[in-house]
Amino acid sequence: MQVKTRLNLFRFIFISILGVLLHFTYEWSGDNPAVGLFSAVNESTWEHLKLIFFPMLLLTIIEFLWAHIKNKPLPENYLPARTIGILSGMAFIVVGFYTLNGVLGRNYEFPNIALYFAGVMYALRTENRLESKQMCINDYVAMTILAILAVAFFAFTNYPPELGIFTDPTAD
């Protein structure tokens, strides 16, 4: 249990730090379009979902490579559980953001930041609960979902639909 707790703490710190950095890397890069594919390019809810998606995707790749190099098996339902965890964390952030804005009547920075960290924790908790359970999706479905999400982030960064989740509240 101690190893799992340390691993989850590492995962939380890795995802959180990388996510926070991705909030600023687009601006730091001088608005480089390639950096914008992975970083938030504006203050829309959609763009902020990249801050949980891409760090968790990178962590997934790192953990797969690490397990392969060390010849250690990952949990049987690792990828489906991680995928559902990512989706759950993203949903948590969206629902929490719009609920907070509805209740508070406006957008506040501190609750949004706290919501991000809570979303990361929720994603990891969901993943941990599902790793040992029978899943309704397999690795191929999970990989397909992750690929579709990555393509959607790339496409909607450059061509956002005219929906509220894609609207930058700071734009004039």
Image: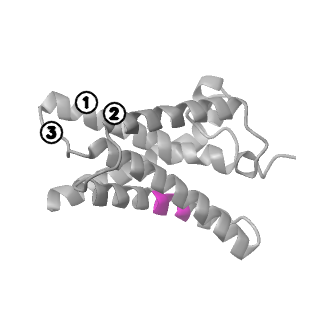
The magenta span reads 114-119
- Disc 3: CA contacts within 10 A as few (<14), some (14-19) or many (>=20): few
- Disc 2: CA contacts within 10 A as few (<14), some (14-19) or many (>=20): few
Residue found 32% across the figure and 40% down from its top = 138
State the separation of the CA atoms marked 3 and 1: 11 Å
The residue under label 3 is which amino acid type? Answer: Pro
- Circle count: 3
Residue tagged 3: 73
Residue found 62% across the figure and 40% down from its top = 40
Q: Is residue 161 part of the magenta span, yes or no? A: no
- Disc 1: CA contacts within 10 A as few (<14), some (14-19) or many (>=20): few
Q: Which mark is residue 65?
A: 1
* Quadrant of the drawing holding the N terminus: bottom left
The residue under label 1 is which amino acid type? Answer: Leu
Residue tagged 2: 61
As rendered, which of 59 and 128 lies closer to the eye? 128
Mark 1 and mark 2 in contact? Answer it, CB < 8 Å: yes
Residue found 39% across the figure and 34% down from its top = 143
Work out which residue is located at the far bottom of the displayed protein and give it. 103
